[in-house]
Image (cartoon, rainbow, N blue to C red):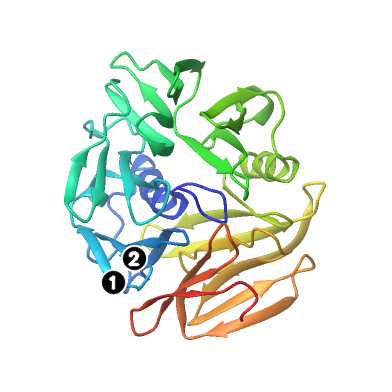
Amino acid sequence: MRTSSVSGGIVLMALTAVLAALLTAGCGPAPVTGPQPVRLLAVSHGGAVLYAPDTGLLTGHGRTGARVWQDRDAAAYGVEVTCLAECPYAAVSQIPAEEAPPLRPFLLSGTGRAPFPVSPAAHAHVLSARSAEDAVVEETDDAGRTWIRVVRPDGSERLPVTHRGFQWVESTDGTAALAYPWQAGSPQDHLLRFARDADGWRRTAQGPSLAETCVAAAIAAKGECVAGGRAAAVVTRTATGEGRFHTTVIGLRTDGGTAWRRDFAAETGVTAHPGEDVIGFADGGTFTALDSAGDVAWTKGGVLAARFTSGGELVTLTQNGRVEWHPSGTH
């Protein structure tokens, strides 16, 4: 999913991971208390993808805000939604899980579901895709062996890895990226760096410095990296056996240390501006942008969820249910 927070499918994946952790701990299914907010999973200049936890409905919206597609079944499988060149056209694939039956990757568009033949593997998790010939896929066979496959028009390359559940963190200009496994440990052992050329992604020895600092901090905290052009934060999420969610957001200094911290008694989406020193979140109907010191830079009311695009636009879900695009610099 190409978003300005340069992180793929984090919100839906985080919720799935939290619930899975509760089940693993023997807590049983967590009855979520109260209505859950609709989440903006991905945005671009041309569209957006939303997820409504209360109904399990995934929807794709065009630039006018009109609904282009909807899917009521995919979220039940624990999936990640990855926009192609532009949202809302998206690939849906399954997040690795021991107990989940395989779900083949598929496309969602205005004509409904269609196969997405990006991988022949028994279990395929799409990390990034512009098309089926330009993608990065985490693959696992029936024996449990896992690798990352880089698909390019001129062929593909398989990179063996020792963990499952990779996340994809992409630079705001789309030229560099990092892949790292969810809650795996040391980034030196498991981090993969990529650069993009005219034919797609290829492995490289050096990644974007701010994003790599963010990834290292996220792995240490067993959380998510949200990185923009000049600001980054680590997001961790927990839930009680009663289904109450808690989100912690830690703004990072350039050395990876903590600059500021905010806590929310909810499952809160976090986004980073691609060019400005700003981390933002929607809470209580207000979008708040914080600067590098954790001070409020600006706010916008009437917002249930929001994300920055790679071009700096703010895409918001308003309190009356509309998806709106706001040009960069217009707060």
Residue 15 locus on image (x, y percent): 40, 53
Q: Answer with left or right where residue 25 lies relative to residue 309.
A: left
Q: Nearer the viewer, residue 183 or 147?
A: 147
Mark 2 burial class by Cα count in 10 Å: few <14, some 14-19, many 20+: many
Residue at image position (79%, 54%) is 253
User: Looking at the picture, does residue 102 appear above or below residue 87?
Assistant: above
Residue 169 location (% of width, % of height)? 57, 42
Name which residue lies at 73% across and 42% down. 213
Q: What amino acid type is highlighted by mark number 1?
A: Ala
Q: Check the picture and name the quadrant holding the C terminus.
A: bottom right
Could you tell me which secondary element the residue under label 2 belongs to?
A: strand
Label 1 close to label 2 by CB (< 8 Å): yes
Find residue 221 and report its horizontal and vertical position in percent. 63, 45
Q: Is residue 232 rendered to the left or right of residue 108?
A: right
Q: CA distance from mark 1 to mark 2?
A: 6 Å
Q: Is residue 134 above or below residue 10?
A: above
Circle number at residue 66: 1
Q: Quadrant of residue 124?
A: top left
Q: Residue furthest right?
A: 255
User: Which amino acid type corresponds to the residue marked 2 in the rendered image?
Assistant: Gly
